[in-house]
Amino acid sequence: METLGELLTETVRSARAAFPDLDFVRPAGQLHVALPPTTVDRVRVELASPSILRLQSLGVSTTPALSPVELAARVTITASSFADGFRETFDPERLLDAEHPHGVQIRTEHEALPWAEVAFAEPVELTALHLRGIAARAAIESRDVRVLIGSPGGPWVTVYDAPGRAEELQAWVRARTVDVPDDLRPTFELLAGPLALTVAGHYQPARTAMKSAAKQLSDEARREFVRTVSEGVLHDRSLDWTAHGPTRSFRFWSAEEKQDYVRSTVAVADALRDLTPHVCFGYGAALAVVRDGDLIPHDDDLDLIVAFEPHEAATLPEAHALVEDFLRARGFTVKGDFFGHRHVAPAGGGKNVDVFSALFEGDRIAWYPGTRGALDRATMFPTSEREFLGVTVPLPADPVGYLETIYGPGWSTPDPAFKHRWRKKDFADQAATPPPPEPERRTGWLGRLRQSWR
């Protein structure tokens, strides 16, 4: 009997085989558009949604075959715009040399409809076009690429349309539902949309669709989906499906990038110690130090946890405000209006650190997400320290006890699809902003006189 994992794996494999062009969104992705011999005098590449057009090369195959040098002498290349410095370094011959990438040749500004055009001095017979994206994760911005050609005196004709291909893929995946075993069909129908969106590179809609579907899925089905799309699609694109959807996980970071990020996180913690001694690595950051000795391959950010006494902050909004005001005054960038945390980055820019705030309730404490009151002071504070990637980092007083409480007895076994307890209602009273004091009532002379008679 076929399992859900086998079904999803085969669907992904078949989808990528049927729609190889959609892998243009991977770093240095390539898109080959074959054409019947067609006389043209212009070619256009554009994005169908607001973004930045980036290209390493735009190869043009003609009959008879013309080399990049010959083509460069016969064309005029224009773009909707050039980002700073790219107009000066633009080399038409390098752009037209699809076999030998020379780095980014075209980079527009962020526009509603960025484009680049190749105009031929004399019409040529065109047989194929070959696009090469940039060798970086920003290649994903080409997911809505369109390729058009124009014949002398004729209108533009679309010969490749990525948005249309993404719709075809959605229909293709849905059509497979009829062949799915009855016991797996309801689950497959829930996962078909997120799966197709992921293959097409529409990652944010895929994450949104999966969050909606997850409400009706078992944990096992959710884990199979995460494993399948990560191993079957995203790893080839230097991405993982993490708690934040498809992102560039630590699996694809260099050792230097990791160490710099750990140092940056410790710098935030060191600054916060002037606000409260109750600050340390938490969640996946603590797990990485204690269990892995490295940043978790399927994770994509680090977390700090801070705690405040009742006299310091009565509610979570007050705790967040303390963190925001304190760090901003010291040059950090603080963003977000999340229930349990804020995003913090160095003043000069860099990767965000998630800073989670919590309130002591006697001897108990909990951070959201998590179980209210699950931890005690002795487990958490005063903090301990360990060496991690060459950096001394702060940890809970009892790191293992903390991890057992947060992740359960299986904390030492990696689980890319682990899900925290997201129950805001358990923290509702902590999230409530105290009402403002009532204004002093003004009763006038008659009211004051009546009060004096009582």
Image (cartoon, grey):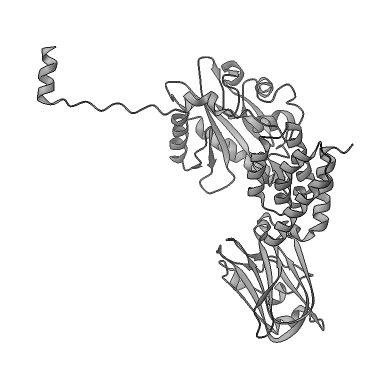
Looking at the rendered image, the quarter that the C terminus falls into is top left
Between 124 and 276, the one nearer to me in the picture: 124
Q: In the picture, residue 172 is in which quadrant?
A: bottom right
Q: Is residue 172 left or right of residue 400?
A: right
Residue beneath the point at 60% across and 34% down: 303
Percent across and percent down for residue 239 are 72, 48
Residue 253 visible from this viewpoint: no
Residue 408 visible from this viewpoint: yes
Percent across and percent down for residue 196 are 73, 50
Q: Is residue 258 above or below residue 427?
A: below
Q: In the picture, residue 149 is in which quadrant?
A: bottom right
Percent across and percent down for residue 75 are 68, 82
Q: In the picture, residue 184 is in which quadrant?
A: top right
Percent across and percent down for residue 98 are 76, 70
Q: Is residue 235 above or below residue 448?
A: below
Question: Which residue lies most toward the bottom here?
Answer: 122
Looking at the rendered image, the quarter that the N terminus falls into is top right
Q: Is residue 330 left or right of residue 188?
A: left
Q: Is residue 100 left or right of residue 316?
A: right
Question: Which residue lies most toward the right here?
Answer: 1
Residue beneath the point at 33% across and 28% down: 436
Instruction: Count all numbered tags in the image, as a single digit.
Output: 0
Residue beneath the point at 81% across and 48% down: 11
Q: Is residue 96 above or below residue 212?
A: below
Between 289 and 142, the one nearer to me in the picture: 142
Question: Which residue lies most toward the top here?
Answer: 454
Residue beneath the point at 54% across and 48% down: 349
